[in-house]
Image (spheres, rainbow, N blue to C red):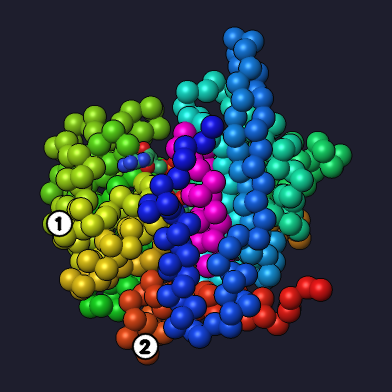
Amino acid sequence: MPPVVDARRSALSIAQRQFDAAADALGLEDSVRKVLREVKRELVVHFPVEMDDGSFRLFTGFRVQHNIARGPAKGGLRFHPGLTLDDVRALAMYMTWKTAVVGLPFGGAKGGVVCEPRSLSDNELERLTRRFTTEISLIVGPDRDIPAPDLGTDAHVMAWIMDTLSMHAGFSVPASVTGKPTSIGGSEGRYTAPGRGLALVTLQAMRDRGIDPSGATVAIQGFGKVGSVSAQVLAESGMTIVAVSDSRGGVHRSGGLDVESLIALRDEGGRVSEYGGGDRVTNEELLELDVDVLVPAATEAQINAHNAPAVRARVIAEGANAPLDPDADAILNDRGALILPDILANAGGVVVSYLEWVQDQQAYFWAAGEVNARLREVMVRSYQQVAARASERGLPLRAAAMELAVDTVAQATAVRGIYP
Ligand code: NAD
C-alpha cells in the first residue's frame, strides 16, 4: 500500500496554494480556477510482477494528467519507494506550468511506480516496466500522453516502454515516449538537456544581476542526470564546483572539484563521498555552504523553515522539482536570494523531450548542435519573459513564472469552453 499522506505536508496542497496565489493575482474566473486547481484524470494500478526466485510481488503505480488543454500530456515516470498519489498529482500540475512557461504545446502529467529500482535485478525491472506500461497504455500514447525519465528511471526504461507500446500497436511508435536511446528515435542532447538548460538560465540570471560567473562557487545537491550535467556545464563556463553530493552524502573542496573524475567514480558504481580529492560533507552541511550558487538537484522540500535561515547562497537554481518548501521560499526571498524557480530552471529536459517528439513525428533527426541551439533559444527567451514580468510587477521570479504559466493555460482552457 502507498504511504498515507499527511494533509499538512501534502505536495498537492502546496502546489494548489502556489496556483491560488497566481490565480488571485490574475483575477482568474471562477470556472477556470476550479478546473485548473484539480487534476483532470488519474489512473492507479496494482499489478503483479514475477521475481527472479519465482515468487510474485504486487506493485502500485500511477499516471496522472493534470491538464491537456494545450496539447498532449507530458511528464516523467518516477520509480521510488516513497512515491504517493499526492506527490504525483502535484508533480503533474507543475508539469502543466512548466510546459506553459517555456511555450511548448503540451499539457502536464506525471507517473511512476512505488518501488526501489536498485533492489530489483535488470530482468525484474524490465518485467515491472513492461507490465506497468501495459497497465497505463489505456491513457498514454504519442497524441495523448508522452512519458519521460525522472528519478529512478533512465533511457533503458524508456526503451522498454517504447517497445511495449510498439508491440501493442504492431509497429514502432517512437513518439510514444521521450528520453529514449538515439538508436530507437531518441534525440541528441536529451540526456544533458535538464542540466544544460539549468546552466543556461543560471548564467543568464547571474549576468543580469551583475554577478561575474567566472570563478563563482557552486554547490550541487544530487549528482544524477540533472546535478552532474549542471556541474559539467557550469564548470565549462568558468565556475568552480566546490561541493557535490548524492543520497549518502557529499564531498567539498574550496579550491574546486574535478567534475569529470566524480562522474567517472559514479559511473563505476561509487559514491561521491568516497572521492579522495576533498573533505566529506553531509547533505545538510552542503546546503549551508557559503557559495555563490546552490543547485538543489535531488528531491522535494530539501530546504525548509528549519534549514533555510542557514542557507547562504546568493543564487539558488532549482534543479529538482519543488526542492524549497513555501516557508523556505519566503525566508530566502526576504533575505534577497535570487531563486530560479523549478518550472523554468529545470525545464530543459521537457524542451528537448518536445524536440525529440517533433523529430520522431517528422522522422527527421537533428545533430546535437542544432538541438542545443534550439534549447538555448527557448531557455533564454523564457527566462527573459519571466524576468521582464518580475521586474514590471516587482515580483520574485517564481511568482512571475507562475503567473505567466497559469495565464497561458487559463486562456487555452477558457477559449475552448466547458464541454458540453
Ligand atoms: P537521478 O535519479 O538521475 O539522480 C538523483 C540524484 O539525487 C542521485 O545522485 C541521488 O543519489 C541523489 N539523491 C536522492 N535523494 C537524495 C537526498 N535526499 N539527498 C541528496 N541526494 C539525493 O535523478 P534526476 O533525473 O537527476 O532528477 C533529480 C531531480 O530533478 C528530481 O527532483 C527530478 O524530478 C528533477 N528533474 C529531472 C529531470 C530529468 O529530465 N531528468 C527534469 C526536470 C527535473
Residue, x 23% and y 78% (percent of image)? 210
Q: Position of residue 152 (x, y in %)?
A: 49, 38
Q: Is residue 337 magenta?
A: no
Quadrant location of the C terminus in the rendered image: bottom right
> Which circle's residue, 1 or 2, is located before the other in the chain?
1
Find residue 338 and report its horizontal and vertical position in percent. 27, 70
Query: Image height check: is 356 above or below 112?
Result: below
How crowded pointer 2 is (Cα within 10 Å; few <14, some 14-19, many 20+) is rated as: few
Residue 370 shows in this picture = no
Give residue 310's mark: 1
The correct choice, above or below, for 251 with respect to 405 in the image is above
Task: Determine the residue positioned at 60% across, 56% down.
Answer: 109
- Seen in the picture, residue 410 relative to 113 is either above or below; the reply is below
Kindly indicate the quadrant of the structure image that contains residue 104. Answer: bottom right
Q: Secondary structure at mark 2?
A: helix
In this view, 235 is above or below 345? above
**Disc 1 versus disc 2: distance between alpha carbons?**
29 Å
Direction top: furthest residue = 53
Asked whether, in this view, residue 332 is left or right of residue 233, the answer is left
Q: Position of residue 219 (x, y in %)?
A: 24, 52
In the rendered image, which residue does mark 2 sit on? 393
- Please name the residue shown 33% across and 28% down the image: 270
Q: Which residues are magenta?
A: 74-97
**Residue at (57, 37) in percent of width and height:** 113
Q: Secondary structure at mark 1?
A: helix
